[in-house]
């Protein structure tokens, strides 16, 4: 929008939710278990009617759909839309019964895509394996300076004798890896008995299970509950380490980029997506996925060597610049321009690529 484009976004929103003028509500989202997580989707006849009305009123030059292979506003838009369409694919799975199930529903529409974007090599591989075809890799974007400029909070700032270690994620989802971290905590406390573990995220069942597992070590763990975006940035700017113990299903790792931007040293499981975000360990510390003992050793190693920690965070602060929205937006706009130029050459549209109205439809992130 800042570059002069007209943008309209269709996304799920409750009726009482305040949304910017450029967003149109596609209706209330329903929580659906998907990919070891909970996806909030909007689907059905009423949503389809809203999609058709929005497409007709918008008369867009280009349509950009996120995760169009899931039952969502994006899938409904794909079925109903004509003209240039760009799809962004986020999912990273070795096997997906869900994708196999919906493939017959969307197969006739796959040829509608003028271009495909995958947020990582893992997402690109999932797309190739399950749907065929290829995609351009453009990562998710983060406003890096928002986290660079975040102010530390004294409540969460550590010391060499009392380091602070953070985890952010939904506590009830096993793939987020809280259980891997809680199993590592007793070993870390043997070396750093005053360490504080700050756990942010919702999930009463996950919290109860973690406390039961921790036993007497639970006194070193503070459950912060859900926190705001501003609090998240401040937390990441305050702690000594950010732990990303996810066990699978991750196509990128936005929170890693946020932590790197804020100056926290990152310790992450060696998932392919995380390895690439951490430049294969140059910009952070990696441990064997699902191995709590190795996680504990890696945390201790990172805390024992502040100089090495500082060196990796310095590398991280430069490496994350490629994920800033200023870089990502430029790449997405380049895809739009190629698509619009190709469509114009085929006589499908007549637009000025410099000021083309564009659209985005997808589930809230």
Image (cartoon, rainbow, N blue to C red):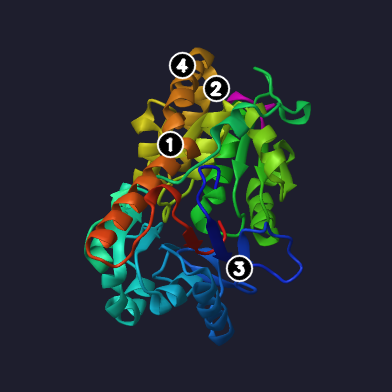
| Residue that mark 1 sits on | 327
Mainly helix, strand or loop, the magenta region?
A: loop
Using the numbered discs, state the Cα–Cα distance from disc 4 to disc 3 in whole angstroms. 42 Å
The x, y position of residue 95, in whole percent, is: 31, 65
The x, y position of residue 358, in whole percent, is: 46, 58
| Residue that mark 3 sits on | 12
Q: 311 and 15: which one is in front?
A: 15
Closer to the eye: label 2 or 3: 3
| Residue that mark 4 sits on | 311
Closer to the eye: label 4 or 2: 4
Element at badge 2?
helix
Element at badge 3?
loop
Q: 67 and 63: which one is in front?
A: 63
Q: Is residue 195 magenta?
A: yes
Closer to the eye: label 1 or 2: 1
Q: 163 and 5: which one is in front?
A: 5
- Mark found first going from the N terminus, 3 or 1: 3
Q: Residues within 10 Å of mark 3 (few under 14, many from 20)?
A: many
Closer to the eye: label 4 or 3: 3
Using the numbered discs, state the Cα–Cα distance from disc 1 to disc 2 in whole angstroms. 33 Å
- Mark found first going from the N terminus, 1 or 4: 4
| Residue that mark 2 sits on | 303
């Amino acid at each position: 929008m800042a570059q002069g484009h007209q943008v309209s976004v269709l996304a799920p929103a409750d009726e009482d939710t305040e949304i910017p003028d450029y967003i149109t509500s596609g209706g209330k989202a329903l929580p659906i278990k998907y990919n070891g997580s909970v996806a909030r989707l909007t689907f059905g006849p009423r949503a389809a009617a809203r999609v058709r009305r929005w497409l007709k009123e918008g008369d867009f030059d280009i349509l950009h759909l996120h995760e169009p292979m899931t039952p969502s506003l994006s899938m409904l838009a794909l079925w109903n839309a004509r003209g240039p369409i760009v799809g962004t694919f986020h999912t990273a799975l070795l096997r997906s019964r869900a994708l196999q199930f919906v493939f017959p529903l969307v197969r006739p529409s796959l040829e509608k895509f003028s271009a495909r974007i995958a947020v990582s090599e893992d997402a690109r591989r999932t797309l190739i394996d399950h749907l065929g075809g290829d995609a351009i890799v453009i990562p998710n974007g983060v406003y890096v300076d928002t986290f660079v400029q975040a102010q530390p909070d004294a409540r969460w700032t550590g010391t060499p004798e009392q380091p602070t270690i953070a985890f952010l994620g939904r506590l009830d989802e096993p793939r987020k890896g809280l259980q891997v971290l809680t199993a590592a905590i007793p070993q870390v406390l043997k070396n750093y008995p005053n360490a504080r573990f700050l756990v942010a995220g919702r999930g009463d069942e996950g919290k109860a299970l973690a406390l039961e597992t921790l036993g007497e070590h639970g006194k070193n763990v503070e459950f912060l509950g859900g926190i705001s975006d501003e609090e998240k940035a401040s937390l990441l700017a305050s702690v000594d380490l950010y732990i990303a113990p996810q066990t699978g299903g991750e196509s990128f790792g936005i929170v890693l980029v946020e932590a790197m931007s804020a100056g926290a040293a990152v310790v992450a499981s060696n998932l392919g997506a995380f390895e690439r975000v951490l430049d294969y360990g140059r910009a952070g510390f990696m441990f064997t996925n699902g191995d709590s003992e190795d996680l504990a050793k890696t945390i201790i190693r990172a805390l024992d060597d502040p100089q090495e920690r500082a060196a990796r965070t310095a590398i991280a602060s430069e490496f994350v610049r490629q994920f800033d929205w200023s870089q990502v937006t430029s790449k997405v706009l380049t895809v739009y321009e190629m698509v619009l130029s190709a469509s114009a050459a085929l006589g499908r549209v007549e637009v000025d690529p410099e000021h083309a109205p564009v659209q985005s439809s997808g589930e809230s992130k």
